[in-house]
Structure formats: C-alpha cells, structure tokens
Amino acid sequence: MGLTQCYKILSDHLVSGKLECGESISIKMDQSLTQDATGTMAYLEFEALGINKVKNELAVSYVDHNTVQVGFENADDHEYLRTIADKIGAVYSRAGNGICHQVHLERFALPGKTLIGSDSHTPTAGGIGSFAVGAGGLDVALAMAGVPFSIIAPKVIEIRLKGKLRPFVSAKDVILKVLEHFGTKGNVNTVFEYTGEGVDTLSVPERATITNMGAECGVTTSLFPSDENTREFLKAQGREEGFIPLSADPDATYDGLFEIDLSLLEPLAACPHSPGNISKVTELEGMKINQVLIGSCTNSSYTDLKKAAAILSGHTVHPTVSLGVAPGSREVMMMIAEDGTLETLIKSGARILESACGFCIGNHQSPGTDAVSLRTSNRNFYARSGTASANLYLVSPETAAASAITGVFTDPRKSDADLTEVRMPSSFIVDDSMFIYPSGKDDVKRGPNIGEPPKGTILPSIFKGHAVIKVGEKITTDHIMPAGARLKYRSNIPRYAEFVFESVDPSFSKRASEYRDKGESGFIIAGASYGQGSSREHAAICPMYLGIKAVVAISIERIHQANLANFGILPLIFRNEEDYQKINEGDELELLNPYSSLESGEFVLFDNTKGIEIPLHLFATDEQKKMLKAGGRLMEVKL
C-alpha cells in the first residue's frame, strides 16, 4: 500500500513510536523559527534548559510582530533576541526584513524538511512541501535543543483540486471554500494534503496562501507536492539545489476526500467574527466599507500585490476608505519598487505600511468605531483588530482592491483590469543582508522588562478550588491573551497576566490571583474548540501564573492543549457534553484522586456547590502525563 506525502516525510523523520494514525510519535525537526511576539519567551526557555548551542539544522529568529515601538519594551526585546541568537547559533532576521512565513518560504523552506515554529501559521511552508507545524515556544526551544517533537500520527484528508481558477478568483477563495466545508473546529490531529491536476495551475505563493489558512481549520499542517512549480520557485530564489520531487504514491490511502473544481469557484469572504463564517462576495455587494488592508503572511507576495495594483491602476481610493498595503518581505518591497508596482499603489492613494505583521495582530491600523474593515489576513476574531465594535471581513487581494475603489463591497470580476500578465517572475531580487548570522559572541543584552520563564508546581494531592470563569465555544487565544498594545509585556509574565481574558471578563485576573493567594487551584470551564488561533503559549503561562490548574472543556485545540500540558495545567474533556451546562462560575470544585486519575486518564470532578459528580477524560499523551505530574515541562525535562 502506497504512502501519502505526509507519511513519507514522517517516516523519514520518525524517532520513536508507531507510525499509525492515532498513535503518539516523536519526530526530528530539521528547522525552527520564532517571531518576536513569542520568540522572547522561547529563547528564555532555551536558556532555562541549560543548552549552549542550537542543535537542529537551522534556527531563525524573526522580528516581524512588534515593530511599532512605543516605549522601550519592544526595542529591548529585539536587542535580547539579536544577542541571544548570536550566542547560541541562530540566524537573526532584522526588523524590516519581513514577515517570518513569507521570508522563510523565500529563503529557507525546502521540500521534505520538517519545520517547527512558535507561530500557528508556520504551516505556510507546506506550500513548498515542508512538514511545517506551529507550536508553543517551549516546544520550539526543545526542538532547538535537539529534542524530538511529539505529535499524534494524524489522519490525512485528500483535498483534490481540478480545473483552473478564473480571472479575479484566487487562492484565498480556495482556502475559504475549504473553511466553509471543514469549519474551524473538529479537525484536531488532521493533515490536509492537496492533490489533482488543479495543483499544477497554482504557484508556490498561491499554495502557501492555502496552507497558511489551513491553520484556521485547526489541522496539524497542510501539504502540497513538490513538483516543477516548486523547482521554478526555488530556482527564481537561487536555491534550486534544495529541490527534491515529493508527492503521494499513486495508490496512497487517505482518511477522507474533498473535491474542489477550481473553475467553479467565485470570490468569497469570511464574515465576522470567524474565518469559518463564509459568504459569497455577491451576497455582500453594496455594503459600505471604511478600511481595506492588503498584506499579512497570507496575501503579501509579489504576485498578490501586482494583482491588487493592476486593479487599482488609474483609480483613486474612495474618499471614505483608508487603504493600507504591507508587502510581506523586503524582497517583495524591492521587487515592486523596481517594476513600478509601488508607484501605482502610491498613486492610487494607498498607504504603504512596513513589511511586518502589524495590522493583522492589532498592533496598528485599528479601524474606527463600528467600522467595516476588509483584510487579506487570516483571522477576524472579535476585538483582534484593537476595535471591539469593528467588523472584519477576510477577502482576497482582488476583492480588497476592487472594493477600495468603490467604497463598498465589490465583486472584483467587475474590474476592467487585465490580470493575465501577472505571473511569477523567473528570478527574484535576492538580498540577504538583513540576516545576521551568528558569531558565537556571549554578550546577551537584557532590558528591565525581561524576566525569567515561570515554573509550575507539582500536581497537588488535594485538588480543590473554584470555577474562576466559564466561557463559551470557540474561545481563541486572543480572547485569553490579548495581542496589540499588550504584546509588549510578553517577556514580563506578572504584568502580562493582568490582562488575561481582558476582552471577556476584565475582572478575571484579580479574581484568579485572589483564589491563588488563598492556596486554591483555579479552574477554567469552557465550551467546544477552546484555544483556537494563535500558538501563543502565554495563553497557558499567564493563567498558570494566576493559579489555574485545570481547563475543563468540551474540546481543546491541538497547540493550546500542548501548551497547557507544557505548563502543568490539566487539559480535561467532559465525558458528556451536556455536563458543561451543570457548572457555573464560582462553583466550588474538587478533582478526586488526582494522582491515580492522572495514570488512568479518567477523572471525576465533584461540584461541591451543586453536590454532583462529573466524569472527565484527560486529553494528554503518556509523555504529557509525566510533565503534568511534575508541574510542567520545565520542571520535568532533563537534558
């Protein structure tokens, strides 16, 4: 029986475990990446492991998230990241060099390699045939230390593409169609693998757009084959020597099939407040808009911006609309500056933004009160933009550009632009001067905002406390730990912990710390798909600091579950979903026999307030059980 592309790569990197769907396995990680919003803690954790040098093939530290520097905190963190990278052997990508996923795709990602990144959109590199996974910073630190990465051997869903996209329909519309079908929950421990003749019609950047937003479905990663298009992309980047052909065997067996006829797709949009809330653009036409933002790691490639500029050419942005464009990398910026695309964008009235994540994480360009913002980014969670009352729609660059001209939601197929000449270039402008390669100099700089990674405490033998908060379904890591203006505290856990659940319940932090100071164990009660979105491990670290010892949910997403276990918080699942309704915030709770329950994986929660017992299941591997008993990975690991 033939192998899927996914299982070929896993087989080549298997360190331990049985490579069968549902089994726990450990794999060697060839490459790692961090970004500055999560990387500071990752490198602090690497230091806490007592390792002096990076042990995997390549580690790259990108500065792309917190490049808006109001106050000293971000600049100090960047200096720490530069100097620690120099000491331990990581490549440092300076602020201005671009967004980690776009830059890594251009300069480092290779077919057949494994990549782990402290960012949930690391699967972008699946567009070039890498097995690329997002993870918490501690897992990335361990991978840099040479520790194999543990995952559940996934089920693999074949997404078979046929036909060819029509003009003004793009790769963004493909992944929005996938999200419409699969949704944003229920896809844990799954990989999407793209096959079919339609694959041949998509360039590597288009494929990367699709694999990037597979993260919104909650899958482990997404993969495209490495073929002639891959070779041409690597050749254009001056990296053809890294090419290998890689695809599934003709007789590979999949765990499911979803077919898409590319020729039948039309422009789509993800409506507030979920990437899975999909509508046709024709159903939204005429809606007044206030802001358009083109960029992010999803849609900031050279060809994305060329298409947007072609639509904008000869037009001026509508008087009531603010248009911002953020090229994904310095390479893209230089390309569009050389060929006249940048001039076209500027003449249209676009504001040229830095090559950084910026608006996607709410770090700037927050829309006005009750505004409608069209964005080519990958997430439109409530309040993520920095404006709670705003409504964010996720669209393609074509839809974004067409709508910026009219001031209302507009089907880009009404444009008279000619996009047929927009093609992948045969060569890119390659300038790696913004990478700093390590010298081994030991002169690490630490600003006053940089603390130590907090460690947990061992599993208590008497496990009593209160339900500190009860939340609904689809609670994202943005809900748990706000980004935007708060991200500058990411290396200062006591300060950052003041903002846990800020957009849900601003009193949570005070209430949790009061329970903690009384010696109680805090519980979070949650609905389905708890911990969607960003890989930020602070959504586990800060609750741990506040005394949270268990999350009891209907379901928990993969990366967040791993982060909870890494920091000694029990990830518990209701045996019976209806039991979620029985617990209220403030209830006095007790976990019976925590040590024996940890071994068996079966817990009983006693609600002392209600006088009822609720059966729970521990959502953890055998390896995670050991770290949960110890109080977290930093307490348990010995290298």
Image (cartoon, helix red, strand yellow):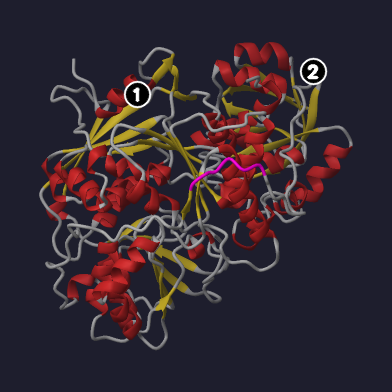
Give how far across and how far down residue 476 sits, in percent: 55, 47
Image quarter where the C terminus lies is top right
Please give left or right for residue 145 compared with residue 330 in the image. Answer: right
Please give left or right for residue 410 compared with residue 460 in the image. Answer: left
> Can residue 283 be seen in the rendering of this structure?
no
Q: Nearer the viewer, mark 1 or mark 2?
A: 1
Q: Which residue is mark 1?
A: 10
Q: Nearer the viewer, residue 367 or 54?
A: 54
Amino acid type at mark 1: Leu
Label 1, residues with CA under 10 Å away: few <14, some 14-19, many ≥20: many
Q: Check if residue 439 falls in the magenta segment.
A: yes
Give the number of callouts. Answer: 2
In the rendered structure, which disc, 1 or 2, sits on the residue that comes first in sequence?
A: 1
Q: Which residues are magenta?
A: 437-442
In space, the residues marked 1 and 2 are separated at their CA atoms by 39 Å
Identify the main secondary structure in magenta.
loop
Assign a secondary structure to mark 2: loop
Assign a secondary structure to mark 1: helix
Please give left or right for residue 514 compared with residue 297 in the image. Answer: right
Find the residue positioned furthest to the bottom.
Answer: 319
Q: Which residue is mark 2?
A: 461
Q: Nearer the viewer, residue 218 or 323?
A: 323
Seen at 58% across and 40% down, the residue is 440
Seen at 52% across and 71% down, the residue is 365
Amino acid type at mark 2: Ser
Query: Mark number for residue 264?
Result: none
Give how far across and how far down residue 11 sits, in percent: 32, 19
